[in-house]
Image: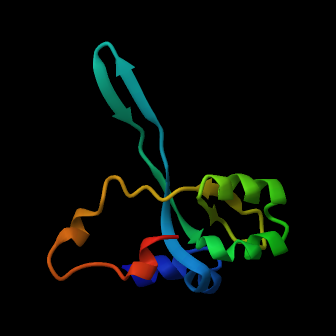
């Protein structure tokens, strides 16, 4: 459930207030060309957090990202996501929102997400 994912996120209160909890998946994709096939490894899943772009100061104040990382991420109109507690040794990545696949669950009549939740 969403509540379980929210509680499992690193720094759960901070994450819910300044971003959104997430399930982070690490996996590898192998693509062969002759013959054409796609192979996918078993994903490793862990709780994470995606910060809204206007809340990056949280990471800057804790000296977890520097000015160059902020500039590079901002230039690509992305945001930051992290796994692990911010007080420990978090893994922080510049990530982008990929909405090209669309969420087919949200395309049903009467179901949708609020506009403020649509863009990070």
Residue drawn where x is 56% and y is 74% of the image? 9
- The residue at the point 30 percent across, 25 percent down is 37
Residue 24 at x, y percent in the picture: 51, 59
Q: Where residue 39 sits in the image (x, y, percent)? A: 35, 32
Q: Residue at x 28, y 15 (%)?
A: 35
The colour scheme applied to this rendered structure is rainbow
Residue found at x 14% / y 77%: 109
Q: Position of residue 48 (x, y in %)?
A: 56, 67
Q: Nearer the viewer, residue 86 or 66?
A: 66
Task: Reply above or below: 28 against 79.
Answer: above
**In which image quadrant can residue 49 be found?**
bottom right
In this rendered view, identify the residue nearer to me: 115 or 41: 115
| Farthest-out residue, left | 109
Name the one closer to the observer, 89 or 76: 76
The residue nearer to you, when weighing 10 against 69, is: 69
Q: Is residue 32 above or below residue 98?
A: above
Q: Quadrant of the N terminus?
A: bottom left
Q: Which quadrant of the figure has residue 73?
A: bottom right
| Residue that sits furthest to the front in the current view | 75
63 relative to 77 in the view: left or right = right
Apparent side of residue 47 relative to residue 93 in the rendered image (left or right): left
Instruction: Please state the horizontal and vertical placement of residue 74, each as a whole percent of the image.
Output: 67, 59
Q: Quadrant of residue 34?
A: top left
């Amino acid at each position: 459930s969403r509540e379980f994912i929210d509680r499992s996120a690193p720094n759960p209160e901070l994450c819910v207030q300044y971003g959104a909890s997430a399930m982070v998946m690490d996996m590898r994709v192998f693509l062969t060309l002759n013959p054409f096939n796609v192979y996918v490894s078993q994903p490793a899943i862990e709780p994470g957090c995606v910060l809204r772009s206007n809340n990056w100061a949280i990471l800057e104040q804790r000296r977890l990202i520097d000015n160059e990382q902020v500039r590079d991420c901002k230039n690509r109109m992305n945001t930051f996501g992290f796994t692990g507690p911010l007080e420990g040794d978090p893994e922080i990545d510049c990530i982008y929102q990929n909405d090209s696949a669309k969420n087919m669950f949200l395309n049903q009549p009467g179901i949708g997400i609020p506009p403020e939740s649509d863009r990070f």
